[in-house]
Image (cartoon, rainbow, N blue to C red):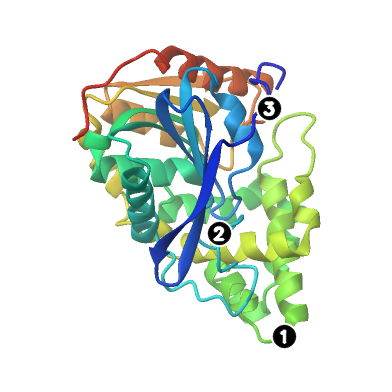
């Protein structure tokens, strides 16, 4: 990732009360007078790490990062099994994004998202297209039931030994059903040892199914037991409900993105998130450019994917938008 912009620190940050007992951490970096851009991180539950700031020219952008409900520096922490996830859904997150936009006095902004953040970005943009100037999306997902089934079961054809371990970590009578539901039940078990084992096995499989690129290295965040539990709880919560979206709605409603320029960046070796998801979206959204990266997989797994994201933010940094009210 040699092409990333230099590290920067926030010039402003705070905790936004979004209701339901939740406080969402937010920060702004770069140029206070620059083009507004907001980052929607992945997971769900990964948090907005500092590297996201480096995907933008700090002289040109007013960069907004925030940690979605239950993760990062937001409270309460989903790593605490006592934290209810009842008010942690996609409609809640969309409302949080919009509340943060108004809180910061921004009319419209570029929305950048990766992986789960793409699903959230599309859902937000389709609901509030007047407040989105551009979309830069990599590792494109829609979090449909088919995608969840693909990751949790069909990927076993690619990694049979690893998937067998993933499957066998749930009770035998549940192995032929929804593995996401089975793991969610284990992660809610009153026994902390059961919860810890489930979180460890979930994150172990997470590291496997994205490891299609040569030279893949395990995610060091999964060494932290609190991160593992937070991440596993939030991912299973969202996946078992297919992202709290009507199945297929994001693709069906892609016409609402008309007039919004977008770049869809996806690795051809992203088998856990098959490239056809990005391709179908590009067919339904004429204002989007599809960039397929050979020999790279999920996330910012290599220099070419990172360079494509940087090229997109560079392209849009001088573009003025008349959207917004």
Residue 154 rendering spot, x and y as whole percentages:
57, 51
Residue 7, numbered label = 3
Residue 268 visible in the current orientation: no
| Image quadrant containing the N terminus | top right
Name the residue nearer the viewer: 317 or 284: 317
Which badge, 2 or 3, comes first in the chain's sequence?
3
| Number of the label disc, if any, that sits on residue 74 | 2
Q: Visible in this render: residue 248? A: yes
- Does residue 220 sit above or below 7 in this rendering? below
Q: Residue 224: name its quadrant.
A: bottom right
Helix, strand or loop for disc 3: loop
Q: Distance between the residues labelled 1 and 2?
A: 25 Å
Q: Do the CB atoms of the residues marked 1 and 2 lie less than 8 Å apart? A: no
- The percent position of residue 167, horizontal first and vertical second, equals 68, 65
Mark 2 lies on a secondary structure that is loop
Disc nearest the viewer among 1 and 2: 2
Residue at 66 percent of width and 42 percent of height: 210
x and y, in percent, of residue 162 in the image: 75, 54
The answer to which image quadrant residue 310 occupies is top right
What residue did someone put label 1 on?
Answer: 191
| Residue 242 placement (x, y as % from top left) | 41, 59
| Depicted 109 relative to depicted 154: above or below | above
Q: What element carries label 1?
A: loop
Residue occupying image coordinates x 24% and y 46%: 127
- Label 3 near label 2: C-beta < 8 Å? no
Badge 3 local density, few (<14 within 10 Å), some, or many (20+)?
Answer: few
192 left or right, relative to 257: right
Choose the circle earlier in sequence order: 3 or 1. 3
């Amino acid at each position: 990732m040699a092409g990333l912009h230099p590290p920067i620190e926030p010039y402003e940050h705070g905790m936004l009360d979004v209701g339901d007992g939740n406080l969402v951490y937010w920060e702004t970096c770069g140029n206070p007078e620059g083009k507004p851009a907001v980052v929607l991180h992945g997971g769900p539950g990964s948090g907005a790490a500092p590297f996201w700031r480096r995907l933008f020219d700090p002289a040109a952008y007013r960069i907004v990062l925030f940690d979605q409900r239950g993760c990062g520096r937001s409270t309460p922490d989903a790593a605490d099994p006592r934290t209810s996830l009842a008010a942690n859904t996609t409609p809640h997150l969309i409302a949080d994004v919009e509340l943060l936009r108004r809180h910061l006095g921004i009319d419209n902004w570029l929305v950048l998202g990766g992986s789960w953040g793409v699903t959230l970005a599309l859902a937000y943009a389709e609901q509030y297209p007047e407040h989105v100037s551009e979309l830069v999306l990599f590792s494109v997902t829609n979090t449909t039931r088919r995608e969840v089934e693909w990751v949790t079961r069909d990927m076993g054809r690619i990694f049979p030994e690893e998937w067998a371990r993933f499957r066998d970590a749930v009770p035998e009578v549940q192995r032929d059903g929804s593995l996401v539901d089975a793991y969610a039940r284990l992660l809610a078990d009153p026994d902390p040892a059961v919860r810890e084992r489930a979180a460890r096995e979930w994150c172990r499989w997470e590291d496997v199914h994205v490891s299609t690129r040569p030279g893949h290295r395990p995610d060091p965040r999964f060494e932290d037991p609190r991160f593992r539990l937070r991440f596993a709880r939030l991912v299973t919560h969202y996946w078992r409900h297919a992202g709290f979206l009507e199945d297929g709605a994001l693709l069906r409603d892609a016409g609402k993105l008309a007039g919004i320029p977008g770049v869809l960046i996806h690795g051809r070796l992203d088998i856990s998130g098959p490239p056809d998801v990005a391709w179908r979206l590009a067919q339904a959204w004429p204002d989007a450019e599809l960039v397929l990266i050979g020999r790279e997989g999920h996330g910012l797994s290599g220099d070419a994917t990172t360079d494509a994201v940087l090229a997109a933010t560079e392209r849009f940094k001088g573009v003025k938008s008349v959207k917004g009210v």
